[in-house]
Image (spheres, rainbow, N blue to C red):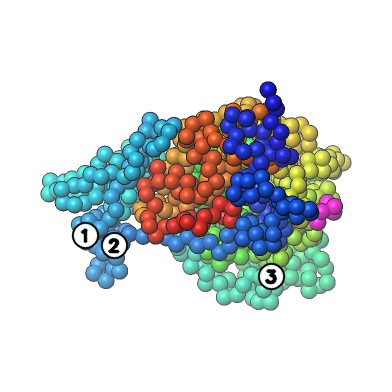
Amino acid sequence: MTETTYPAGTAPVKAEYLLYVEPRPTPDDDVAEGSTKRGDDYRRPDDGSDQRRGGASRNKLTKEEKKAQRGANKGRKFGKVRDDLELCWRIASGSICEFGEECRFTHDIPSYLAAKPKDIQFPSTIDILDSSPFIKSSTGESNETQENGMPVDQSTICPVFAETGECRHGLKCRFLGGHVQKDGSGNLVLIVDEEKKARSAVSAKEVNFVTPDVLRLLRSRKVCHEHFYKHDLNEFQYPSPLADAYLKELQLANNEGGNGSNLHIHSGSGEAGVATVNESMEPMDVLPSMNTSELVSRRIGGDTSLQNDTPDVPVRFSEKKRLNWVGKTYLAPLTTVGNLPFRRLCVDYGADITCGEMGLATSFLAGSKEEWSLVRRHPSESIFGVQLAGSKPATMVPAAEVIAKECAGNVDFVDINCGCPIDLVFRTGSGSALLDAAAKLGKIITGMNRALGDIPVTVKLRTGVKDGRNTAHKLMPRLGSEFGVGCITLHGRTRQQRYTKLADWDYIKHCVEAVRAREADEDLPSVPIFGGGDCYSSHDYWSDVEQSGCDGVMIARGALIKPWIFTEVKERREWDISSRERLDHVKKYAEYGLSHFGTDTAGVNTTRRYLCEALSFQYRYVPIGLLEHLPARLNDRAPAFRGRNDLETLLASDDSRDWVKISEMFLGPAPESWTFTPKHKSNAYDSQG
């Protein structure tokens, strides 16, 4: 038997499943993140032939071909798809609209229901087939209507009602038949399952909702925190006394020609854990004229006179919550795809620690509704954090204080992004730019520690900014011992390197040893350290932990491609997951998306958009049962292959139209006005939409 020869970096698919050996183009994650670099500039001829260009340009893309075929689809727009006739949401939920006839939405329920698309049929697991049409109900919709023309089919199931006992979208729900019944007059009445509603209030209700009043207060700020030092501290409408006091100290230290070095938090016990107020600081309206040590003494001594006229007293470092994360699995904060429904899915598969998508401190302070939606947490997320990006104490510290107030008790840590390589972020001094600004980073961490009370501050960073100039081994020992960081995560690549080379786990080990040596010298408790980079299997995970001495591995792209990696890690096995099991988790993602984004027309198609975003990564998974040998490697490019059945082949398709087709199995046909533009150009098709 002749052994198949594969080009370097190709996933070794068994010969019986191969369509051709040479790997198909892989989306360039660097370019899609905004990099100016390019990855592999070679490709297989589009016509499937073996023709090569001669000489040095053999099989190499021309400049025009590179521009046309590689990179990201920039400026993607995903407009909301709404009902042709929009029903007032108050009327839809059975309430009374205070605007009456002046409401800009219709109150005519029969007309709305007559114009509304038919109910979507949400299939059960037993309806999923291994071959086309994959779902027994081929259209994905019910064809039944009530006698008055209302498109309601009471055989359908509303996944939100099934989980929570009620559906907040009422008559606007696209699965309406699952929670309505007729009254004596033949009118539709919404059903509420009070028992299930009571149970789900704890187990299924999301938290960290920020009220419109808070957003209005944040938007009413008269000046920008970026120009904080130039304006009166009391001009802000949203009160942030701890941030104000800390920034005042920095301002005074700068005015006196100092560098604020006396503000660092140390990890020792007692009063060394509290940074004291500069004695020359003028009294502020929000603080009595005493230093922080006196405030601590009076608070500990039970002086209740401080409860109403002072901010919460900054805690000692020793009073911070200690993060005991050894042995826990950690899902990285992921832009776009790492939303709440995806995190829920990863939790189901065994993720212990989750973190929201990166949010900009300036946008939080500007009262951005979209930014504040990133802090939403599901009760199933047992350890949940918020990630902040910013370049100045004047924005990061106030943002941390607002998060601590508005999400009290529902945020376990706040992570500082010191690793984002995107040009747009880097040029503002945020993300990985902070790696070369240790003094400023120290001030940010110190201020955030004060503003967050007992909530720990964690830091995610890269090995350095430029290739060949790793600096993390110098910075990391300071993060815990000088600045009071509760956990450190190190991605084993530089900012410049992006994803073009393998992560350097030998250097991660060097950094871990540097931190542990400093902790031993100063008799400090150990800070959890997580490594990151190229983890794609249980074998990778445990090998990386053993090799580096890390407490765990933060998983990013590996989880995007195969969310079940957390099960593999927990059970220390490689899971040859079946296509039906994979489609079942697609169904579960759709359920979670509808619960989060809504079951009305807009919510269904927002769920569809993010499901397609998730599939734009998951199609890259090569089933391990198709491989010649294990373990699979993250950066191996897949050749064109067929699956063990039609469903497995469909799930491996790199055609974005097939991702939309998969979404239609659970969310009904996509509206004619709806299109999906993939993040990567390599998956876009001109014939689409």
Q: Tell me the crowding category of disc 2: few under 14, some 14 to 19, or many 20 or more residues within 10 angstroms, Cα based.
A: some
Q: Which label sits on residue 283?
A: 3
What residue lies at 48% left-to-right and 67% top-to-bottom?
A: 216
> Residue 525, located in which quarter of the rendered image?
top right
Kindly state the secondary structure of the residue where label 3 is placed: loop
The answer for how far apart the CA atoms under marks 2 and 3 are is 59 Å
Chain part drawn in magenta: 466-470
Q: Is residue 576 magenta?
A: no
**Amino acid at dot 3:** Pro
Q: Is residue 400 above or below residue 596?
A: below
Q: Position of residue 531 (x, y in %)?
A: 73, 42
What residue lies at 74% left-to-right and 35% top-to-bottom?
A: 544
> Residue 452, located in which quarter of the rendered image?
bottom right
Q: Which of the two labelled residues, at mark 2 and mark 1, occupies the earlier sequence position?
A: 2
Q: Looking at the image, do the residues carrying marks 2 and 1 touch, with CB atoms under 8 Å apart?
A: yes
**Amino acid at dot 2:** Leu
In the drawing, does residue 100 fall left or right of residue 492? Answer: left
Kindly state the secondary structure of the residue where label 2 is placed: loop
What residue lies at 51% left-to-right and 67% top-to-bottom?
A: 217
Q: Which of marks 3 and 1 is in front?
A: 1
Q: Main secondary structure of the magenta part?
A: loop
Query: Which residue is labeled 2 in the image?
Result: 85
Q: In this view, does 286 lie above or below 482?
A: below
Q: Position of residue 19 (x, y in %)?
A: 58, 37
Q: Tell me the crowding category of disc 1: few under 14, some 14 to 19, or many 20 or more residues within 10 angstroms, Cα based.
A: some
The answer for how far apart the CA atoms under marks 2 and 1 are is 8 Å
Q: Where is residue 2 in the image (x, y as percent from the top left)?
A: 69, 26
Q: Which label sits on residue 111?
A: 1
